[in-house]
Amino acid sequence: MRTADIIAGPTAGFAVCLAFYPFDTLKTRVQSPAFRKLAAEAAHPRKMWLRGLYQGIGPIILATMPGSAVFFTSYESSKRFLLTSAPQIPEPITHVFASSLAEVLGCVVATPAEVIKQNAQVLHETKGSSSLAALELIGRNPKDLWRGFTLLAGRNLPFVVIQFPLYERLKVAFGLRERGNGLMETAKVTGTAAGLSGGVAAWLTTPVDMVKTIIMLGASKRGGKRLRAADVAKSVWREEGVKGLWRGGALRGIWTAAGSGLYLGIYECILLAMGEKQCCL
């Protein structure tokens, strides 16, 4: 476990969370059938869409720091272990395994915060903390805070399996080498590679994200039965078709591309500034 991984991951995650959180809120609202209905019936729909864009950010900030540390520490440690102990394994397979393991561990930390966040994002009348209001709606059953864990992992695993091998390939294609690059060159190359790979991965995994959002929003409905992913997907398909499953996909793809570029760009620049090897080569 390197100190650089513990510092760089949370720092990058915190910066991206603050910069792009409003876009995530809009994406959640676009995917919420209940919020879309309320906004359509409101006297000032645009005002309702744009109000409280930072609702629910508190739990995410608290979870981002340890979650990013867990992810990058796990990713770097498992990747280095495999590259040194099993060099015969193709590097893309190593990257897939390392990123998948790191993502599952990260989801353990992230799920409760994600449930609170998404329910807070669609609240339209709150006094005081939207996160506390969402937590009150969810109720006292701790199990409700884990609704959607399987889908969160089911969305994030294919995301990182697509993003990280593509990210590694693009960095090599763009000419980044492990040594001899300054901060500006590192930021430019890693930012571009991460942005392209993140945007592609985000758009491709939108259907799972759509189903996850609906299931997590169901945690605030007291007495409601737990929704099954297959039933939710069938319902969306029946009512809206393919377009419904990709609802919010363009918004998610654009802000994830920008966020991934900033996130991994900051991360690798911090590693370089601290005198560490670049993490992903």
Image (cartoon, helix red, strand yellow):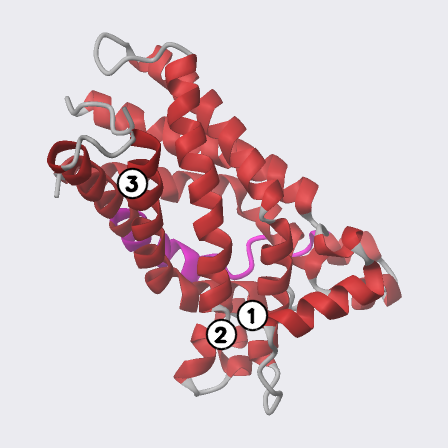
Q: Amino acid at mark 1?
A: Met
Residue 6: quarter of image: top left
State the residue in front, 207 or 1.
Answer: 207
| Residue located 12% across and 32% down the image | 84
Q: Residue 186's spot in the image, x, y percent?
A: 34, 16
Q: How many marks?
A: 3
As measured in the structure, the alpha-carbon distance from the residue carrying label 1 to the one carrying label 2 is: 6 Å
Q: Amino acid at mark 2?
A: Arg
Q: Amino acid at mark 3?
A: Gly
Position of 89 compared to 24: left or right?
left
Q: Report if residue 61 lies within the magenta region.
A: yes
Residue 176: quarter of image: top left
Position of 208 compared to 149: left or right?
right
Q: Secondary structure at mark 2?
A: loop
Disc 1 vs disc 2: Cβ atoms closer than 8 Å?
yes
Q: Earlier in the sequence, mark 2 or mark 3?
A: 3
State the residue in front, 195 or 184.
Answer: 195
Disc 1 vs disc 3: Cβ atoms closer than 8 Å?
no
Q: Is residue 186 above or below residue 106?
A: above
Magenta: main secondary structure: helix
Residue under label 1, please give it. Answer: 216
Provide the residue span drawn in magenta.
50-69
Q: Is residue 147 above or below residue 201?
A: below
